[in-house]
């Protein structure tokens, strides 16, 4: 299993988001750096606020280092803003599991919200479906006919943490 870190910041710039150019994440003690350009970052709006970042921060081997990180946001004019934060890697819930047999799914998850993220046969994203029951039939979810695989996305929205499983076939 490979560990990924989702990293988002609340982005604000008087000249607008289009003026923002690069976002860096540093772990100085381990001498690690991730560069996220404006072409590569994920942008979403929540409660009228703009968030930018990445869902795929990872290291080549091992786990994401715990400790102090430094986030640096740079505008196209070269101005920068920096903030430190601590990542302790502690999850309130065990990693979720999903098993599939004969078109039926069984989820072992204590997370408050569970969703299926679905994909077609080429691995292209199709839809995200909130799961009401931890076990059931994929056919009862009324998924588009092009769906071939799904991953479980378990989330604790209050504490901004989530877990994402590998994909499994839906039939």
Image (cartoon, grey):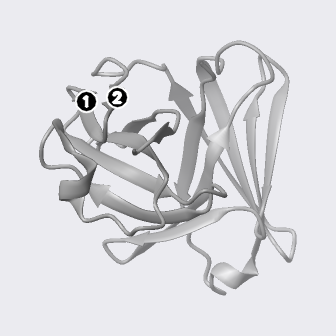
From where the camera sits, is residue 118 visible?
Answer: yes
Q: Nearer the viewer, residue 86 or 93?
A: 93
Give the number of the disc on residue 107.
Answer: 1
- Residue for badge 2: 98
Report x, y in % for residue 135.
17, 35
Outermost residue, left side = 133
Quadrant including the C terminus: top left
Outermost residue, front side = 102
Seen in the picture, residue 15 relative to 117 is either above or below; the reply is below
**Contact check, label 1 and label 2, Cβ < 8 Å:** yes
Q: Is residue 41 left or right of residue 146?
A: right
* Pointer 2 local density, CA inside 10 Å: few below 14, some 14–19, many at least 20: some
Report x, y in % for residue 101.
32, 30
Residue at image location 65% in from the left, 21% down from the top: 64
Q: Is residue 10 left or right of residue 132?
A: right
Q: Is residue 143 left or right of residue 8?
A: left
In which quadrant of the rendered view does residue 156 lie? top left
Seen in the picture, residue 16 relative to 39 is either above or below; the reply is below
Q: CA distance from mark 1 to mark 2?
A: 5 Å
Say what secondary structure mark 2 lies in: strand
Say what secondary structure mark 1 lies in: strand
Q: Nearer the viewer, residue 82 or 113?
A: 113
Seen in the picture, residue 152 relative to 87 is either above or below; the reply is below
Residue at image location 82% in from the left, 28% down from the top: 32
């Amino acid at each position: 299993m490979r560990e990924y870190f989702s990293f988002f910041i609340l982005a604000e710039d008087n000249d607008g988001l289009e003026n923002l150019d690069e976002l860096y994440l540093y772990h100085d003690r381990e001498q690690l750096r991730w560069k996220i350009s404006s072409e590569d970052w994920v942008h979403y709006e929540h409660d009228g606020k703009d968030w930018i970042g990445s869902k795929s921060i990872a290291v080549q081997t091992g786990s994401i280092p715990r400790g102090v990180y430094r986030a640096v946001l740079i505008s196209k004019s070269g101005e920068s803003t920096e903030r430190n934060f601590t990542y302790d890697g502690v999850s309130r819930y065990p990693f979720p599991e999903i098993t599939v047999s004969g078109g039926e799914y069984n989820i072992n998850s204590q997370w408050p919200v569970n969703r299926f993220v679905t994909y077609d046969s080429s691995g292209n994203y199709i839809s995200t479906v909130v799961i009401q029951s931890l076990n059931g039939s994929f056919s009862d979810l009324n998924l588009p006919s092009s769906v071939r695989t799904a991953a479980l996305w378990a989330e604790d929205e209050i504490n901004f943490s989530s877990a994402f499983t590998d994909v499994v076939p839906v039939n």
